Image (cartoon, rainbow, N blue to C red):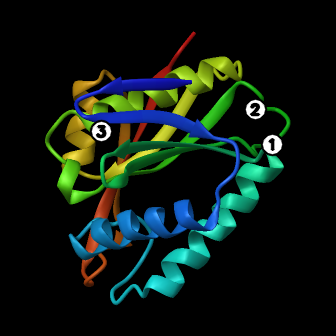
Amino acid sequence: MAAESGGWRIRELQTLDEAQIAQLADVLLDCVEGGASVGFMLPLTPERAVAFWRKVANGVRSGDRAILVAEDSAGICGTVQLFLDLPENQPHRADLVKMLVHGRARRKGLGAALMRAAEVAARERSRTLLVLDAVTNGDAARLYEKLGWKRVGDVPSFALYPQGGRCSTTYYYRDLA
């Protein structure tokens, strides 16, 4: 699957090489340094970011994850994953995780394009229910609501921002059936 728009190209990767891992690490570093609560605390070193993406690469290789990337003229500028390794009573579901857009590509529709591409990838795998979480009332939460994701509820003090301080999270789902 490949989609082109807005100066970028979105495609699914079947494997991740070291160059792609380095570019994904750069996207992660940019997002965390920009304040995104995506599971990492500051300071996030390049080595820790690369180690995270190597674990993702193993999950992609084993089929536990699907990863989509957006590339512009400078390289990878966005990504989203489908976590597929769920209990056997949930073969119809996937968790959408780590939707990240580099600062150079923000506010140009790339987040929405990545979400649409993830929905296509889920359908291709016969996944008809997607679930995700986002910082309550954050930019991502607003995007998901604009795209028609259904808000389930909020969990107060769920996580920490990368610089410290608690944040609530909101759970969403999308029925693709």
Mark 3 element type: helix
Q: Residue furthest left?
A: 107
According to the picture, the residue beneath numbered tag 3 turns out to be: 111
> Where is residue 38, by image quadrant?
bottom left
Mark 1 element type: loop
The numbered dot on residue 109 is none
Mark 2 element type: loop
Amino acid found under the numbered disc labelled 1: Pro
Q: Is residue 110 above or below residue 81?
A: above
State which quarter of the image contains the N terminus: top right
CA–CA distance in space, label 3 to label 1: 28 Å
Dot 2 and dot 1 residues touching (CB under 8 Å): yes
Q: From the top left corner, tell me how far across and down residue 51 is, in percent.
A: 60, 78
Task: Count neighbours of disc 1 (C-alpha within 10 A) and say few if under 14, some if 14 to 19, many if 20 or more.
Answer: few
Task: Count neighbours of disc 2 (C-alpha within 10 A) and say few if under 14, some if 14 to 19, many if 20 or more.
Answer: few
Q: From the top left corner, tell me how far across and down residue 86 is, in percent.
A: 75, 43
Q: Would residue 27 be found to the left or right of residue 64 on screen?
A: left
According to the picture, the residue beneath numbered tag 2 turns out to be: 90
CA–CA distance in space, label 2 to label 3: 26 Å
Q: Which comes sooner in the sequence, label 3 or label 1? A: 1
CA–CA distance in space, label 2 to label 1: 6 Å
